[in-house]
Image: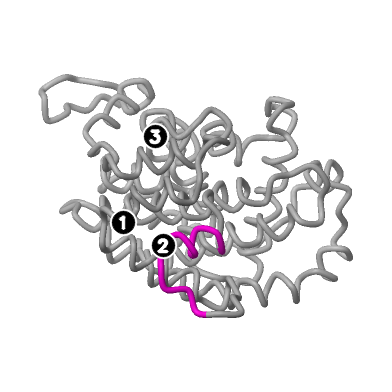
Amino acid sequence: MTVTSKDGIKRTRGDKAASVRKLTDLPTLPGILIKIWKLAESPDTSSKDLEKVISLDQTLTAKVIRLANSPFYFSSSHVNNVQDAIVNIGMKTVRSLAAAVSISSVFKKSRTANKNYFPLKDFWRHCIGVGVTSGYLAGIVDGIDRDFMFCAGILHDIGKFALNILFPDKFGEALQIASSERCSITAAERKVLDTDHAHFGEKLAQYWNLGDDLSGILGNHHRALSEVDEMLRIETALLKIADSIVREIRFGFPGDFLGGEFDPASMELLDLSTEKIEQHKDGVNRQIEKAAELVDLI
């Protein structure tokens, strides 16, 4: 099928490269997020360094302090400044919140996005649920960075934002197919767009310079584990399981109505069983309930 874009160029629907090039139509990330991201990555950064940057944005400052005082991050005393908040919740968590706020603002400003078929608040509930669950599971699997997995979980579906803003009609069609045919949103995206949100998430993370590890996991989370680079295989497996758990408890809206099915290869790699997951499900639920108010911060 050949389509004519706004610039008058004819392209085939299957031209993934042309589709990905449209990412440049999205706004660049705010300068403050870029600074926060780089600071959080550096081992030499102090909480005072990060405070100086965050304090330049009053809205973000208020949200960081509110997050530090939320039930999700229990503190024995009330946090009333950015530096204490950073110490309490961690630099990488602050980075995750700043990224989610920035990406969400792009969606809110869009005049083309499907805001009725793809409710922002319900979508973020799913993403936060996956972030919390990923962080929780990282605590019971050796050798995985909990803060990194929390970040990966929260941002794992940012490709859906890109598709929804850049191809609103096609993404809307994919949402309808996922609903009417009871298939995954990934399958529906591939049917309509000849690509999926995981591919776009990877390219978007690269475009925004969010790091090779994060972009790799975003791109891999719907691939067979055998196709994933060995360096990212454990983290990708954990993200797959976390996504399935959140789908199973139906926390938020991921774009379709399918429940969670645990990937056997991921379960084997992480030495997890359905029985072991059941043992931890109450703990996961408690963490997600505590984190529910994070949606209002985004």
Specify whether 44 is left or right of 120: right
Which amino acid, by three-letter code, is at mark 3? Leu
Q: In terms of depth relative to the viewer, which is nearer, 287 or 163?
A: 287
Magenta part of the chain: 78-88
Dominant secondary structure, magenta: helix
Given contact means CB atoms under 8 Å apart, are the residues at marks 3 and 1 in contact? no
Give the mark nearer the N terminus: 3 vs 2.
Answer: 2
**Circle 2 is placed at which residue position?**
82
Q: Which corner quadrant of the image does residue 58 belong to? A: bottom left
Which amino acid, by three-letter code, is at mark 1? Ser
Given contact means CB atoms under 8 Å apart, are the residues at marks 2 and 1 in contact? yes
Please state, as top left, top right, bottom left or bottom right, where the N terminus lies in the image. Answer: top left
Give the mark nearer the N terminus: 3 vs 1.
Answer: 1
For residue 204, the mark is: 3
**Circle 1 is placed at which residue position?**
55
**Taking 250 as reference, is 90 above or below it?**
above
- Distance from label 2 to label 1 (Cα)? 7 Å
- Residue 8 colored magenta? no
Q: Which corner quadrant of the image does residue 234 belong to? A: top right
Residue sitting at x 41%, y 62%:
82
Specify whether 57 is left or right of 83: left
Q: Position of residue 197 (x, y in %)?
A: 45, 41
Q: Secondary structure at mark 3?
A: helix
Given contact means CB atoms under 8 Å apart, are the residues at marks 3 and 2 in contact? no
- Distance from label 3 to label 2 (Cα)? 29 Å
Q: In terms of depth relative to the viewer, which is nearer, 196 or 122?
A: 122
Residue sitting at x 40%, y 47%:
160
